[in-house]
C-alpha cells in the first residue's frame, strides 16, 4: 500500500490506536493489538510526525508503553521506537538529547 494513500486517514487510525495504547487501558491484549497496529502503520504517519504536538503525544504514548508490566506490550513498544527512529530520525533530537548529552 502506498503510504501517501493512507496519510489522509492517518488521524482517524492514530486516534483509534492511541486509545487502545493508553496506560489506563485494562486489557493487555488490547494494548498489545494497538501497539502492533501502531508498529504496522508508522509509515502512514509522516504528516503527524511533522507536527510537534502530535509527535510529542505519539512519543509519550509509545514511551509509556515501554514501561508496561506485560513483556509482549513492552517489546512491541520498543519495536515501535526502533521503527520511529528509522523513519523519523530527523525529529528525535528532542527526545534523545537529554539521554545522550546530559
Image: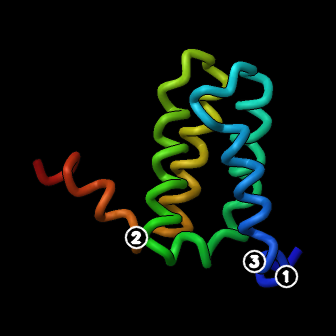
Q: x and y percent of residue 9 in the render? A: 81, 72
Residue reaching furthest right?
1
The correct choice, above or below, for 78 with respect to 10 in the image is above
Q: Secondary structure at mark 3?
A: helix
- Separation of disc 3 and disc 1 at Cα? 6 Å
* Element type where label 2 sits in the image: helix
Report the residue marked by disc 3: 7
How far from the left and from the top, in percent, is residue 101? 13, 53
Is there CB contact under 8 Å for labels 2 and 1? no
Q: Earlier in the sequence, mark 2 or mark 3?
A: 3
- From the image, state whether disc 2 or disc 3 is nearer to you: 3
Q: Distance between the Cα atoms at labels 2 and 3?
A: 18 Å
Residue pictured at 49% horizontal, 63% vertical: 55
Q: Residues within 10 Å of mark 3 (few under 14, many from 20)?
A: some
Q: Nearer the viewer, residue 40 or 13?
A: 13
Return the residue at label 1: 5
Mark 1 and mark 3 in contact (Cβ < 8 Å)? yes
In terms of secondary structure, where does tag 1 sit? helix
Q: Residue at x 55, y 23 (%)?
A: 68
6 horizontally vs 70: left or right: right
View extreme (left): residue: 102
Q: Which residue is mark 2?
A: 91
21 sits left or right of 3 in the view: left
For the point 71% across and 55% down, the residue is 15
Extreme residue toward the bottom, this view: 4
57 vs 72, nearest the viewer: 57
Quadrant housing residue 35: top right
Q: Please say if 7 is above or below 78.
A: below
Relative to 12, residue 5 above or below: below
Q: Which label's residue is closer to the chain start, 2 or 1?
A: 1
Quadrant housing the N terminus: bottom right
Cα distance, mark 2 to mark 1? Answer: 23 Å
Amino acid at each position: 500500500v502506498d503510504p501517501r494513500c493512507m496519510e489522509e486517514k492517518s488521524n482517524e487510525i492514530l486516534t483509534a490506536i492511541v486509545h487502545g495504547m493508553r496506560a489506563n487501558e485494562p486489557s493487555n491484549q488490547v494494548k498489545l493489538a494497538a501497539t502492533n497496529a501502531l508498529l504496522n502503520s508508522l509509515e502512514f504517519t509522516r504528516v503527524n510526525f511533522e507536527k510537534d504536538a502530535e509527535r510529542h503525544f505519539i512519543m509519550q504514548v509509545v514511551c509509556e508503553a515501554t514501561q508496561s508490566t506485560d513483556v509482549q506490550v513492552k517489546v512491541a513498544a520498543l519495536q515501535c521506537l526502533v521503527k520511529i527512529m528509522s523513519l523519523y530520525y530527523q525529529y528525535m533530537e528532542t527526545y534523545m538529547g537529554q539521554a545522550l548529552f546530559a
